[in-house]
Amino acid sequence: MKLKMILALGVLNALTAVSVQAESAVVVNQSITQKEVEAAQQAWCKALVDISATHDKNGKAAAKALAEKVIDSAYGYQMGVVLFKPTLTVNPQTFRTTRAGALSYFVGGDPAYPKDTGFALKGWSRCEPVNAGVFISGNSATTMGKVHFTAANGKVTTVDKSWQYVKDATGQLRIVLHHSSLEYSGS
């Protein structure tokens, strides 16, 4: 009888330990949907317009603070290198694989990147992504298409853009590749 009680207590303790472990386990669905990708693109566009508007209303420091929040929430720099090739960059600083490089591109003012004037500070009033295609494979999604940027004066600038997204450990989409270039003008 005593042995049965000891065995029963041992089984109960083992089940309790398994139950505690199961409760602390975090299971995240890492599959990405097209809806999530399109929402991330819309959020990026909204953030760009918001940074521009913040700059116009509250100055560069406020725009920089917002840009930092946007980069930290949209890009995967906290996960490692992000493959970011902005539209208007030149050698030797063409690629922005660090958070500091991305921030400088968006708002300028970093002496390490003296040619950056702040792409997000150019008075954008609208941003519209148009995908040519979206390729989704499990926890990774890649897009290619156009993004139309509308300036305050109504002039539209169109760029070719590719993004790749992965989900982080919390299930949030993160940009890990961002390539942008002006359309070929034919001349």
Image: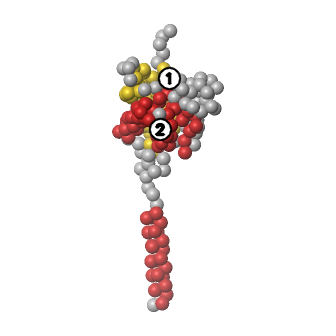
Per the rendering, the mark at residue 62 is 2
Q: Is residue 139 visible?
A: no
Residue 27 image offset from top left, x and y in percent: 44, 55
Residue 158 position within the rendered picture, expressed as x and y whole percent measured from the top left: 42, 21
> Residue at 61% of width from left, 27% of height from top?
114
Image mark for residue 68: none
Residue toward you, 57 or 110: 57
Q: Nearer the viewer, residue 33 or 67?
A: 67
Occupied quadrant, residue 110: top right
Which residue is depicted at the point 50% across and 43% down? Answer: 72
Badge 2 crowding class, 10 Å Cα cut-off, few under 14, some 14 to 19, many 20 or more, is: some
Tell which tag, 1 or 2, sits nearer the viewer: 2
Residue at the extreme bottom: 1
**Residue 56: image x %, image y %?**
43, 30
- Is label 1 in a helix, a strand or a loop? strand
**Residue at 49 percent of width and 87 percent of height:** 3
Q: Is residue 150 above or below residue 28?
A: above
Q: Quadrant of residue 52?
A: top left
Amino acid identity at mark 1: Ser
Q: In the rendered image, which quarter is residue 141 located in?
A: top left
Q: Is residue 187 above or below residue 171?
A: above
Cβ–Cβ below 8 Å for labels 1 and 2?
no
Q: Nearer the viewer, residue 65 or 145?
A: 65
Indicate the quadrant containing the N terminus: top left, top right, bottom left or bottom right. Answer: bottom left
- Residue shown at 50% from the left, 34% from the top: 60
Q: Which residue is mark 1?
A: 181
Above-or-below relation of 80 to 53: below
Q: Earlier in the sequence, mark 1 or mark 2?
A: 2
Farthest residue toward the top? 187
**In this image, 154 relative to 100: left or right?**
left
- Residue 77 appears at what percent x and percent y? 54, 41
